[in-house]
Amino acid sequence: MELEVQIKSLPDSPGVYQYFDRDEKLLYIGKAKNLKKRVASYFTKHHENGKTRVLVKKIAQIKHIVVETETDALLLENNLIKKYQPRYNVLLKDDKTYPWICIKKEAFPRVFQTRNVWKDGSEYYGPYTSVKTVRALLSLIKELYPLRSCAYNLSPENIQNEKYKVCLEYHIKNCKGACEGLQSEEDYDQDIKEIRNIIKGQFRSSLKRFEQLMLDFSERAEYEEAQKIKDKIELLSNYQAKSTVVNPSITNVDVFSIVSDESFAYVNFLKIVNGAIIQSHTVEIKKKLDEDDKSLLELAIIEIRERFHSLSPEIFTPMSIDMGDLVKVTVPKQGDKKRIVELSIRNAKYFRQERFKQIQIIDPDRHTKRIMAQMQKDLRLKQEPRHIECFDNSNIQGSHPVAACVVFKNGKPDKKEYRHFNIKTVDGPDDYASMEEVVHRRYKRLLQEERDLPQLIVIDGGKGQLSSALKSLEVLGLRGKIAIIGIAKRLEEIYYPGDSIPLYLDKKSESLKIIQQLRNEAHRFGIAHHRNKRSKGAINSELSNIDGIGEKTILTLLKKFKSIKRIKTATFEELEQLIGKDKAAKVSRQFKIEQPPKSTS
C-alpha cells in the first residue's frame, strides 16, 4: 500500500504511530492528538534537520494504535519506546542502580538501605540519587528512634517462648529489647509510622509528638529525659530546616525543567514535600531528530515519574505542556513556586556543565562536534564553521597601519596559521580601505596556493568594515562561497551582508564566546605587531638621524645595550670601547652624554 493511501486512511483520533522501513524494521514511534494531521506533517513540510529528512525517506510503512485520550497516547508511547528502542527515538541515558530505603514487612519492621527492590510486600522509598542523602536520613532516624537491627523472627510465639535474648544494642540504648517483650508492638509501630512520615518529608507529626513528650517529662520532673527529647526536637528541626527550600505550604509537588543544545537535552526532577526537597535527579537525553523541548520534557516526565513511583497530583514546569488528564500542570509566574522552578533549571544547567567538562576530557571529538553544530545553528550557516578566520585593523594615532588575521580550527586557535599584514596601498588611517586590502591579499594568496578556504570569516567591526571585506570577496569570486559576518564592539551586534538588522546572541552562549575570543585574539595579535613596528621605527629614527652612524653601527649598539634607554645612560668610555672614539663622540653629542675634556697640550 502506498504511503499516501496509508496517511489518508488514518483516523482523526489520539493515538500512537509507528514508522517501518522496507525491511519492516521499526524506525520511530510517536504520539499524536490527531494521528492523520501529525503523520501527514512529516511528508508535507520541509525539515531543516538532516536526520528527519533521512527518516522520512526510509519510511515504507505506517502502523498506528488508536487510544481514548492524549494521556493514554503519552503512556503507550513511553512503554513502546522502552520496549523496542527504535533508532530514531530519543533515549534517557541512565544506567545507574540507585539506593532505596526499605521498611521491611515483618513484625517490628527493620529500616535499612538497599539497592534491590523485591515484591515481598515491604515498603520501598526512593530511589535516591545520592547515597549521602540516604545515610543522613537513616542516621537521623537512628538518633530519633531506637529500632532493632537484628534479623530475628519476632513473632508473638517466639517472644513468649523467650527464644531470643537482648544484645549489646539494647544495653547501649539503640534498641528497646522487643525480642524479650520489653517493647510492645504498638509502641514500635508508632515509631515506624513517624519514620514513614519523615522519609516522605512530613515532619510535623513527629515534632508535635516529641514536644508533648518533653512537656510530659518536665511535668513529672524527669528533666534528664526531657532534655533528651529536646535534643531530638532540635535534631529533627535542623534536618527540616536544611531540607526546606521554599514555602512549606507547597506540598506533594513534582518539579521538572529542561535545558538543551543542538544534540542533547537535560531534564531535572525535584520532588517537593512540605517545602522540602526529598529527591533530585537529572537525566541526559540524546536527540535523534529535531525534537523540541516541549516534546522531550513530556516524554521525560512520564519516564521519570514511573521510575521514581511518583504519584504527586501536580507538577511545576517552566513551560506549558500537554499531559492530558494524567496530572495537573502549573507554570508558576512569581513567588516561591517560580523560585523552585528556577532552582530546577539551575540544577539542569549545572549537570550540563559537568557533562561538558567530562566530555572534553573523555571524548573531545564529541565536544567539538557539539560546539560546531551549535555555532552553525546560532549563526544560521550552511555548514559547520570548522575553519574560521578573523581580521582586525590596528593604526594607533594614525601611525604604522597594520592588520592581523587569526585562525581557529575546530573552535581552537591555530597559532601557526596567524598572519600579520603591513598596509601597503592605503595612505593614512583608513579602516575600510585597509580591511579591503588585507582580505583581498589573504584570499588571493590562498587561491593561488590552492589552500583550504575557511567556512566563516569574522570581521572586527560593524557594517562599514564588513562591506569593505565583501568587496574583496566579490572581486575574487568568493562571495556566497564563504560565510562572512561582522561583530561590532559596543553591544556585540553581529551583522550579515545585506542585512541592516543585527543578530544578538545570548551573552552566555558558547557561539558568542568563541567569536569574542577570535576578535580579542586578533586584536591582541595586531596590537603586538603594531607596538613592535612602532618601537623599531622609533629606535631606527633616533639612531639613523645621527650623521656618520650607519646600519652596522646601530646593530652593534643595540646588540650590546638592547635599547635606546640604555644607550643614553652609557658612559663615553663604554661607547668608545664598542664603536671607536669618533662615533662615540657623535652618539654622545646626540644623547648629551658627558665626554672627557679635550687635551690642551
Image (cartoon, rainbow, N blue to C red):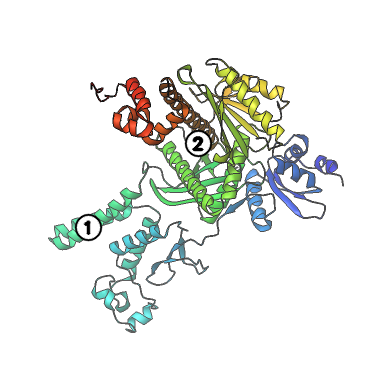
Q: Amino acid at mark 1?
A: Asp
- The earlier-in-sequence mark between 2 and 1 is 1
Identified at 67% across, 20% down, the residue is: 471
Q: Is residue 437 above or below residue 232?
A: above
Residue 168 circle label: none
Name the secondary structure under disc 2.
loop
Q: Is residue 426 above or below residue 410?
A: above
Residue 231 circle label: 1
Please state the horizontal and vertical placement of residue 141, each as a whole percent of the image. 33, 62
Is residue 60 something that shows in the picture?
Answer: yes
Q: Please, which residue is most extreme toward the left here?
A: 221
How many numbered markers are drawn? 2
Label 1: how many Cα within 10 Å (few below 14, some 14–19, many 20+) = some
Front position in the image: 342 or 360:
360
Name the secondary structure under disc 1.
helix
Q: Amino acid at mark 2?
A: Val
Query: Which quadrant is the C terminus positioned in?
Result: top left
Q: Is residue 142 left or right of residue 445?
A: left
Front position in the image: 90 or 141:
90
Label 2: how many Cα within 10 Å (few below 14, some 14–19, many 20+) = some
Identified at 55% across, 59% down, the residue is: 95
Please state the horizontal and vertical placement of residue 153, each as a whole percent of the image. 40, 78
Please state the horizontal and vertical placement of residue 520, each as a whole percent of the image. 49, 31
Front position in the image: 278 or 373:
373
Please state the horizontal and vertical placement of residue 231, each as a whole percent of the image. 22, 57
Q: Is residue 73 above or below residue 570?
A: below
Is residue 293 something that shows in the picture?
Answer: no
The residue where tag 2 is placed is: 331
Identified at 70% across, 52% down, the residue is: 87
Q: Is residue 249 left or right of residue 270?
A: left
